[in-house]
Amino acid sequence: MKHPQVIALANQKGGVGKTTTAINLAAALARRRKKVLLIDFDPQCNATRGLGLEPTEGGSAYEALLGNAKLVDKIVKTSVKNLDLIPSEEDLAGAEIDIARTKHYLTCLKNALTPVKDTCGYDFIFLDCPPSLGILTVNALTATDTIVIPLQCEFFALDGLSSITRLVSRLVASNTNPDLAIEGIVMTMFDARTKLASQVVEEVKNHFGDIVYSTVIPRNVRLSEAPSHGQNIMDYDPSSAGAQAYVALAGEFLKRARAIAETMSSDTPLYQPTSSQGMTSRDRLTRSYFNEETDRPAILTNKLLSSGHAPTGDFRDFLLEHGDLLNTWNSSQLLATPPPETTSEPYSDSMTRQTLVLKTPLGELQAVRLISIDGSYAEYDSYLLKNADDAEKLLSVPEPEIKSEFAGFFKLVESIGERGIVEANLRINPVGTALGLFGPEHFAEMLNSDRQSLHALCQRIADRRLRLLEHLFANDIGPVFSMSIPDPAVLRFDNDSFNEFIVQYDKPVLDMIHDNNGRIRVTCYNAHVTSLALMVEMGADVLGPVRVPAVEGGSLTQVKDLMAGKTCIESFLDGGYISNLDLDSGLEIMESLNRDVFFDNKGLMIELPAVPPEDQGLLQAMVSSLV
């Protein structure tokens, strides 16, 4: 049974966003498939009501603190999947007196919490403390592993911190909780319109350094409205600045949690770095995904070897000896989704008209495709979804079961051996899937008129993706994955929309992969440099294809500056461009890749294009200059 991390949210001052942070951080982690318990330890019961529940007599931790009940029996489900709650009640204030009369008055919560930690399988347990440093808060700090301190961006913000830090020092020095530490400080209620708010953030960071979270929670009307509706902000208004801030905070929180877990864990990871000397293709590609040094750039040959201009003779032998194979296995085939009914009829001498009908509990959905007779070309004449009603129909379809047919993956791994690696491909991301279901025109209309329906659809797709990933990791599939994202510029997304539709639904996928010591390649064709920067920040381990030598909106040097130390560049040699090169120009391109991108001996994969036979000699000479 895994051991959960216990985190107390504490500040002796009220009105600093403590309970708001407890609710929304817990909910954001639950949305990332973490199993979370929130204990409302404040007699004001704000966390209880903020999650849509009413306090009930005897429903709190009161009796369990005195040893008269089991704390596990006080756990209730909330409307948020993966998030449970131990509610509070106003009578909990009386526990301060009763606890003080017990022999072990400092460890009442710690003792009551032990069976919950040992048997319930939570990833995180949050304690929402009262806005004071009384016996309830001291019990919480004795039972917790770490503390998160919400701090309002106001003039006297630092005044309240000194009391907490002194208390932490006393608990550590007295051996009451010798491992207690401050997990982080969250700056809340940030008002960008005032200079004071920025000054307070800067002052706190100067005092406390790296323990201050980079994510700042803005002052936001929607955040203050959500508790009155009994909802967390992600459910109440997922597009709001407050929702996006707590999604970002959850990601930052998990990175710190992973760092702690990695220092404590003795489990063998899916991948362990090896020496960069004497590398096989498998070593080289795996190290590229994990941002480790390699003996040379990886040379991806799959596209060329499988193209209509597949090389023969000496060039083929050269590629088989020096190339690196990156094979993909479609993990989405494990989703037992019912196929639509299809009918076909002649459309023209060269085209067939195919009608697809998907039956849902709320009615039929229909799409029409035009397909060439030889199957080489297809386009949608009309898409499956046209409006919010259609989206609701699709959402009424029950979630598919996940099959356990992994033989194909392991057979592919065995067949490729040391010549390369196998990715588990997750296909296109949620917003890209929504784009494919609506088509560009209707998708743009939905962005303007009904984002809520788009969010509901993206959330369903994201949840399914996370459920699939859990199944893959449980069956030792990995450690490398891939997923494609439509270029934000094509979607006409600004930074806010990128965070709203891509970060919100894709980052939990990347985080789950990283949580399990995996890595992911994100493909985004013809992406602008600004789009690449956003995806690097989101956590892509390999990113591309970056077209060589022409990069949209920048240069290879700029791309390397963005990715250095974080992300491996998957570059793509433009076959049409190569056709116009002489030998010296071709060699100069490879030299520039080596000089401007691979100068640190890591972070470069080069995908070879399909070129006609007359250009294969030049391509071989170019590759030879690197291998």
Image (cartoon, helix red, strand yellow):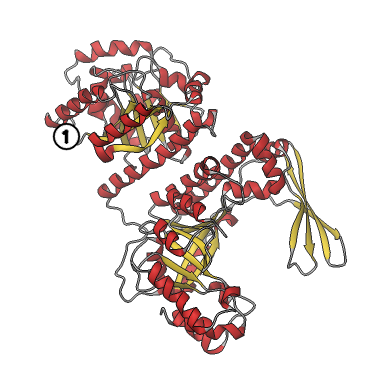
Q: Where residue 255 sits: x, y (%)? A: 35, 45
Can you see residue 401?
A: no
| Disc 1, SS | loop
- How crowded is the residue under tag 1: few (<14 C-alpha within 10 Å), some, or many (20+)? some
| Left or right position of 476 against 202 | right
Question: Can the viewer see residue 456 in this picture?
Answer: yes
**50 up-or-down from 433: above or below:** above
Left or right, 462 with respect to 270, comes to: right
- What residue lies at 75% left-to-right and 58% top-to-bottom? 379
| In the rendered image, the vertical position of residue 451 relative to residue 483, given as above or below | above
| Three-letter amino acid code of the residue under disc 1 | Pro
Q: Report which quarter residue 497 is drawn in.
A: top right
The residue lying toward the viewer, choosing from 129 and 297, is: 297
Where is residue 612 drawn, in percent x and y? 62, 81
Closer-to-camera residue (586/255)? 586
Q: Which residue lies furthest to the bottom in this view?
A: 313
Q: Work out which quarter of the rendered image holds the N terminus and state it.
A: top left
Q: Is residue 412 above or below residue 501?
A: below
Foreground pick, 184 / 74:
184
Q: In which quarter of the image is the C terminus?
A: bottom left
Per the image, the residue denoted by label 1 is 178
Task: Examine the image and state in which quarter residue 397 appears.
Answer: top right
Residue at image point 41% right, 31% down: 217
- Of all residues, the one furthest to the front in this rendering is 195
From the top left corner, tell me how far across and down residue 42 is, in percent. Answer: 34, 18
- Residue furthest left in the image: 174
Left or right of 562, for residue 206: left
Query: How many numbered badges does the structure rendering display?
Result: 1
Residue 118 position in % (x across, y down):
31, 36
Q: Which of 70 and 330 is in front in this view?
A: 330
